[in-house]
């Protein structure tokens, strides 16, 4: 992503915070909650609420959480 696009994204986030936008919260306690969160993230990307780069970082974390949950259940 270009520097100009990064600056634009940051300015959008600052503007949302000024306007009292709600924080995006995800629950990751069970595999079902992780799957539901990933569906929400897909919707956020489709609606332009977050970038694909931001979503990829979240997907990476979700994968780690799922692996930890899998190991915990064994």
Image: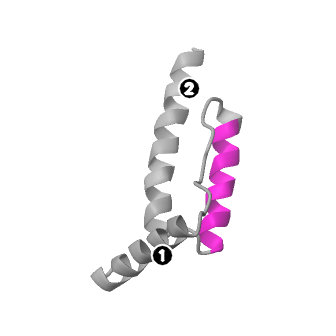
- Give the quarter of the image for residue 39: bottom right
Q: What percent of the width, then of the height, locates residue 35?
A: 67, 44
Quarter of the image containing the N terminus? bottom left
Judge left or right: residue 72 versus residue 30: left
Residue at the location (42% across, 76% down)?
11
Q: Secondary structure at mark 2?
A: helix
Q: Residue furthest top?
A: 74
Question: Is 58 situated above or below 54?
Answer: above
Which of marks 2 and 1 precedes in the sequence?
A: 1
Judge left or right: residue 27 versus residue 50: right
Overall secondary structure of the magenta stretch? Answer: helix
Residue at the location (63% across, 51% down)?
38
Magenta residue span? 33-47
Question: Is 45 situated above or below 24?
Answer: below
Q: Secondary structure at mark 1?
A: helix
Judge left or right: residue 38 versus residue 3: right
């Amino acid at each position: 992503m270009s520097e100009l696009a990064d600056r634009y994204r940051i300015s959008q986030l600052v503007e949302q915070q000024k306007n009292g936008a709600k924080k995006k919260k995800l629950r990751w306690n069970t595999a079902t909650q992780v799957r539901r969160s990933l569906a929400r993230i897909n919707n956020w990307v489709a609606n332009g609420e977050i970038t694909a780069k931001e979503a990829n970082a979240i997907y990476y974390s979700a994968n780690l959480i799922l692996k930890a949950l899998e190991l915990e259940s064994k």
